[in-house]
């Protein structure tokens, strides 16, 4: 079964920072900030002497890549630039076997400067670049119709063009009986588009994922269990991730508590939510129950935070895929 995703292909610059760096740059720890060219230059200048790793990332792309590594057919749509980073990104998709639905524009490929502090919190500073130009005409209807599930995140609501693209994909999904999964993605995105997101949950989504802070912004409630219950009234499957306390899944109103797998002392939390989404969708599209899919998701999220970066190596993903098949009886 195939998953079609629309997202922001980004080149990730990951480097260590401390609280004084964040204060100096007026950045709020643990969040994603959209930055312009000037702010991106300011951050890079501050961090120019720090060691950096460069890799292909972006929230939805991380999920599509991990899904593909686990054996699921995936499509990734989004905008990249006619530049070296755009070429780098497309090579990565080709190497992994993700169907490349990206469109090249005469603009810079988007980047995300991820600042990792000693407490393993990551602060993302995203320059969308070419992603801002992806529009409804760039959605490949033929490819989308081949999918059993359409996946997108709340980050798409930050540009009108990408919003139009998602709206078109949602119409196609509804017309063709394609299920829809939506990850709220960021608490500040929820704060900006709360009413839109509530409407999306009620009208267009089968599966919705949020962490406890995103859910709190959505329902004005600090209790993740109650948030999951509220979300479960709007969509068939609602998931609220609660950090070290595991997660909750509402399946047609019945709530299951999913335990935390792995360490409570992460090396790097970058991509934990993206990996959780990949694990859940892998289990779900393989025919597992939502509860079992949640356990697979929790296990994979627990694994990705033990290493640097938001994507597994090919060899590590193969090991994890085999373990999942044995342990969770995935066919």
Image (tube, helix red, strand yellow):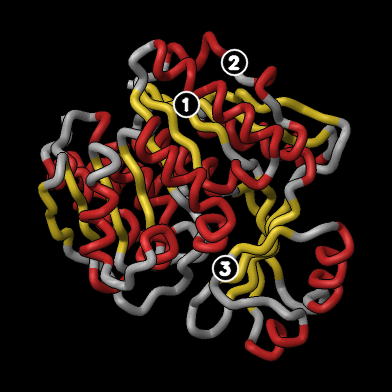
Q: Pinpoint residue 84: horizontal percent, then vertical percent.
A: 82, 40
Q: Does the CB distance between marks 3 and 2 fall below 8 Å?
A: no
Q: Residues within 10 Å of mark 1 (few under 14, many from 20)?
A: many
Q: Does the CB distance between marks 1 and 2 fall below 8 Å?
A: no
Q: Residues within 10 Å of mark 2 (few under 14, many from 20)?
A: some
- Mark 3 or 1, closer to the camera: 3
How far separated are the C-alphas under marks 3 and 2? 31 Å
Task: Please say if 329 is above or below 13.
Answer: above
Q: Is residue 290 left or right of residue 167?
A: left
Residue under label 3: 31
Query: Which label is found at residue 217?
Result: none
- Given residues 263 and 105, the one toward you in this image is 105
Instruction: Identify the image quadrant of the C terminus.
Output: top left
Residue under label 1: 4
Q: Residue at image x 73%, y 52%?
A: 111
Q: In this view, does 331 lie to the left or right of 219?
A: left
Q: Residue at image x 72%, y 25%?
A: 103
Earlier sequence position, callout 3 versus callout 1: 1
Dot 2 falls on a residue whose secondary structure is loop
Q: In this view, does 255 lie to the left or right of 91?
A: left
- Given residues 289 and 159, the one toward you in this image is 159
Residue under label 2: 140
Q: Locate residue 105: give its quadrant.
A: top right
Q: Pinpoint residue 232: horizontal percent, then vertical percent.
A: 23, 47
Q: Pinpoint residue 136: horizontal percent, then vertical percent.
A: 66, 22
Count the marks: 3
Q: Locate residue 107: give its quadrant.
A: top right
Q: Residues within 10 Å of mark 3 (few under 14, many from 20)?
A: some
């Amino acid at each position: 079964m195939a998953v079609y995703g629309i997202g922001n292909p980004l080149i990730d610059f990951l480097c260590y920072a401390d609280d004084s760096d964040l204060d100096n740059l007026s950045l709020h720890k643990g969040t994603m900030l959209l930055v312009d060219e000037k702010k991106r230059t300011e951050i890079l200048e501050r961090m120019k002497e720090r060691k950096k790793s460069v890799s292909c990332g972006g929230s939805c792309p991380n999920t599509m890549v991990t899904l593909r590594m686990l054996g699921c057919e995936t499509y990734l749509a989004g905008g990249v630039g006619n530049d070296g980073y755009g070429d780098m990104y497309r090579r990565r998709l080709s190497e992994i076997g993700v169907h490349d639905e990206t469109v090249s524009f005469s603009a810079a490929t988007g980047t995300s400067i991820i600042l990792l502090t000693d407490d393993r919190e990551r602060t993302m500073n995203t320059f969308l670049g070419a992603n801002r130009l992806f529009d409804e005409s760039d959605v490949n209807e033929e490819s989308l119709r081949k999918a059993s599930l359409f996946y997108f995140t709340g980050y798409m609501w930050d540009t009108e063009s990408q919003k139009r693209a998602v709206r078109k994909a949602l119409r196609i999904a509804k017309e063709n009986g394609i299920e829809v999964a939506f990850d709220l993605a960021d608490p500040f995105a929820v704060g900006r588009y709360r009413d839109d997101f509530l409407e999306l949950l009620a009208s267009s989504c089968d599966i919705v994922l949020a962490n406890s802070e995103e859910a709190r912004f959505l329902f004005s409630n600090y209790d993740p269990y109650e948030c999951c219950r509220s979300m479960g009234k709007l969509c068939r499957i609602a998931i609220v991730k609660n950090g070290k306390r595991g997660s909750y899944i509402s399946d047609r109103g019945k709530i299951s508590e999913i335990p935390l797998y792995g360490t409570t002392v992460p090396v790097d939390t970058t991509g934990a939510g993206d990996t959780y989404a990949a694990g859940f969708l892998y289990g779900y599209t393989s025919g597992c129950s939502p509860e079992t899919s949640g356990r697979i998701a929790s296990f994979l999220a627990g694994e990705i935070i033990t290493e640097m970066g938001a994507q597994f190596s090919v060899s590590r993903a193969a090991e994890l895929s085999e373990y999942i098949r044995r342990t969770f009886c995935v066919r």
